[in-house]
Amino acid sequence: MILTRLTLQGIRCFANPFTIELAPAAINLITAPNGSGKSTLVEALRLAFLISHRSAGESIQSLVPWGASLDPQVTIEFQAQGRSWRASKRWLHSPAATLELHQNGSWSKHAEGPAAEERLRHFAGMPGGFDPGAASQHAWSTSVLWSLQGKLELDELPAPVIDSVRTSLHQQLDTPASLALSKLLDKRYKEFWTPTGRASVNSPASRLRTELDAARQRLDAAQSSLEQLDLLRDQLAALIDARAPLDASIDALARQSADAAAQLTQANQLHAARQSELSSRDVANAQASAAQSTLSQWRATQDTLDQHRARHATLLESAGPDPLAALAAATATLAAAEAELRDARAYRAALLERDSQRSLLHRLHQLLSNKRHTEDALRALNAPTAASWQQLTHLWNNLASTRRQLDSALVHLDLHAERPLDLTVTTGSPAGAHSLPAGASLRVSGSPAVELHIAGAGALRASGPPASAAELRAALDTLESRWTSATAPFAESSFDTLQQRRAQAAELEPALASLDAQLNALLAGRTLASLENALLAAESACAAHETAHPNWSAAPPDPAALEAALPLLRQQADAARQRTADARDAASLLDIIQSAEIQIADWTARHASLQALSASLDELLLQSRAHQLQIAELDARLAQFPPNLDATAQDLASQLAAARTQLAANREESERLAGRIDALAATAPSRSLAEAAEAVEDLSRRLDAIDLQANAVLRLHQTLSECQSTLMDSISVPIAASATAILSAITAAPLGNLRLSGKLHPDALSTPHKTVPLDVLSGGEQEQVHFATRLALARHLSASEPQLAVFDDVLIATDPARLARILALLEEHRDRLQICILTCHPERFAALAGAHTIALPPHAGN
Amino acid sequence: MRFLHTSDWHIGLHAAHAGAAAPRLRQERFAAARRIAALAQSLHPDFVLLAGDTFDSNAPHPADIRETAALLAAFPCPVFLIPGNHDPHVPGGPWLHPAWSAAPNVHPLLTPEPVPLPGGALFPCPLLSRWQSANPLAWIPPALPEHGIRLGLAHGSLSTFNGPIPPDAASLHQLDYLALGDWHSATPLTPQPLRQAYSGTPEPDAFSQPNSGSVFLIDIPHPGAPPSITSHRTARLAWQKQTATLRAPGDALRLRLELEAAASPDLLLDLTLEGSLFPGDDDELLRLETALAERCFLARISRGPLWPAASETTLPPGPLSLTETRLREQSASGDPVAAAALLELHRLAREAGL
């Protein structure tokens, strides 16, 4: 498509009609300062070819000049497909689109409305079949041939544009029909597969697979039921098979058990008879034993009765008359003698205690008296104690020392009057007026000076060291005061007197300590009062004994003599005690004698006589012997039975019962199993199995068919994609080679081979050694790469028909040398490309000598 | 002595291979049994021998047991039958169902004991488990004059086919005739005389069961006389397996017309299609599938190696043409998915107007 004329009105700065005419086979250089409407011209071109006249949106509204109420209008004249065309379009209030064809010297309407739009889009490189409302990037004119203001960089081309480029390149990759097939294939693909190539959950195959899984589960369940049925039947068969041996066993056990029971009954009868004989024998034996015992006792009783009677007489004789009274007298005598002995011993002890206490108390009173005398002497002395004397001595020494220091610190003025003198001591001591007779002396002391005035003679002043004795005097006063206080308790302040007293006291204090030690030793922790109480107690005890035994005070008793008399008294008491015992034994023996006589009377009453009892015993022994013989016979008969007959019978009975229980359990289990089998068979698992297997088979077959379809669609989809990629490569490779050649021509030194993506976008330069991403190139080089790619694409797109190429304010970063080569390249292509350059820098394009220059007035649109 | 020999009714047939037609196939088993009953009415046998596998399993549907018992009760003569390997006599099995007590002429022979017959004796050999390795006829006592005509009734394959029954069992056990069951195809009746035979199933239940679908009528005039065996057709269904190869334009149309003409409600067809598809063939095959599904008892159509004829490439040059070329190459190497993809490509091309 070659543009020859463009008229626009009511668009941005072009409120009024404005027309430019372009040279068809030339480089058109449209120059104008900024803001003159250059880019609006390109926008008008886009509107004319690609924007529907029905559009009334914000993008169209924004075109209307500010403050005006105009409809945007564009009219273009162009050549395409070997013919001249004119298109007029108006937007907003009276929208219209008309396409006219120049024929026979005049314009005739070719199409209008949507049909006109469709043709215009086709001229601009938008493939048919696209939504008219689709954006203009679907046209290769705006994507490749027309570089909008400052936008030389080539974006990745959208698929429709690539398709359109392919179409224009006569590759026939995607015709509308083939696109329709692709759409159908996509739709078909989505029936089975997700975009990522996974099986779609909503596909027929997935649904069938779900049904198949359910059928397989039913099949497994039915199979399991049948297996369970077989198992139950096997179990039932085993139970039934087990019954015959069980029945036989029960019969045998029943017979054995009956035999054992009969034998047991017979044996039990014999045992009963034997038991009876045993009882009879035991009764006879017991009776014989009793008779034997009675007989023995009778004879023994009879034998001892006479001995008891003799002994009784002897005892009576030994006891004598009134043995109890004799015993009482002897016992009392002995007790009185023993009591007297105890009292005598106590009295002796009390006497000893009383004397001891008296002696101790006497000694104590002596020591206490001595102590009181010593203490009185010490008090009278009023001497300081050793400790206080030590303190007093220390204080006295300090006092003396201080006095010496004071004395040495004073100024002494000694006067010796040769004649009577009246003087006055003004400073020093003794102060005041003094009258000294002749020959008298006076010492005046003071510190630091002494002054005196002698009447008639004058004043004297004597001074010493400047040090003052005031402190020493004060210290001396303090010490003297302390001395006075310390000695006040002794009513004596003389050190020597006190020292004498202290010496005397030191002599008395050891004697006092010795007395205290003796007292403490005698008291031994006791008090004097307690010792006096003990003395009183001992004296009371002595008095009590003397009261009880008045003669003891005169002649104290002799415990040894009293003790020597006791053995005799004790022998007498023992003899009396023996007589009493004999009397008691005689009484007891009399009871025995009487009891034996009663017993013998009883035996006589029961058995008549000893001889009769003996005969009866013989009879009982004969009976016992007869029973024993009978028992032996029964034992012999019982020995003929098998041992443990009872246990055997019980064991057989138990076995029989167990076998019967087992049989009953077998039958019960059989019935239970039969019930379960019937219940399971009633569910017709075989039919379920058949139906499930049939469903599985049917679904599997259908699924196989669907899977084949799905896989076929997948394979078709994949193969078509691979083929499209293959063909895409076959397109991009020659365009890349062409762009590389153009780039080399621009740079004069090869930068490398330009590599295009599948979407015909330049993405790298490759050299034999490395691949260089575009973003590491300089801004100018990037600009040149995109220019080269655009020119290569434009060269291919214009292969069959010249095309309009627009460069609006581009190549800003390219240096003059390369720009010159670019312009030369453009010159080379002007037979195939109608080139339209819009710029505000016409000097950069001055090399284009043959360019058709259109200089827009500074305010062309105003 | 005249009797009918039949076997392998397989009531409650498991017919996974028949897919959705299986329930109808099961009903056909009863229909065949009813046709045998009708034969019994017309041929006046003294009794009927049913040589095992009356049921397809030993856990048949109770309704099937009842219906079978009722159907056999309607026979005009006694029916003696034995359990086979599909329906062996086991505790709780179908032979203990109370339905049999309501059919006095029906005698499930569950123990190997001689059964007296008018003029002879029957020696049944019931199977008590699915797997039988020993000769089930081993128990048959030697012949005695009072036996009269000795008949055997057994189920199982011959030992020459890994079965338990000796190939000369009838002579080995001195039988005038041994009625066998297990094989669904019948023993060929020539040359006669035959003393033992498989009657086959009265209604074939699968493809590849030649010589089935009949019962035998046996006449034996006296002990030792050669049996006279005649076959009587009882089958209704025709099982047909076919492969059709499409080679030239019009083959699909011809096949459709031919099969539509042959289609019948008794036909079970297993058709495999292969070869080249020409314009319109795909539609013909779809029509064929629809017609057969409507008209046949069962039509199972499998698409084998099938792809568009090479001369039918009408796709424009470009990716579609290249895709077709690649898929055709893959198909030629026997890739069924590629062949199907090729068909899909052409179907979509037609739909897209290419």
Image (spheres, coloured by chain):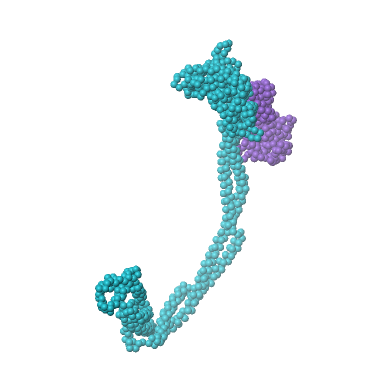
Q: Position of residue B295 (x, y in %)?
A: 62, 24
From the rendered image, report the letter of the chain displayed in purple: B
Give the vertical position of A608 relative to B114 (above or below): below
- Relative placement, left or right, of A68 versus A547 is right
Direction front: furthest residue = A457
Quadrant in which residue A581 is drawn: bottom left
From the rendered image, report the letter of the chain displayed in cyan: A
Between A288 and A528, the one nearer to me in the picture: A528
Q: Quadrant of the C terminus of chain B?
A: top right
Between B22 and B347, the one nearer to me in the picture: B347
- Relative placement, left or right, of A485 versus A817 is left
Direction right: furthest residue = B191
Q: Position of residue A185 (x, y in %)?
A: 59, 26
Residue B195 seen from this side? yes
Residue A685 seen from this side? no
Quadrant in which residue A158 is drawn: top right
Give the vertical position of A200 relative to A31 (above or below): below
Between B316 and A567, the one nearer to me in the picture: B316
Between A578 and A61, the one nearer to me in the picture: A61
- Relative placement, left or right, of A860 versus B154 is left
Residue at 64%, 31% in the rendered image: A752
Q: Position of residue B265 (x, y in %)?
A: 62, 25
Residue at 45%, 19% in the rendered image: A69
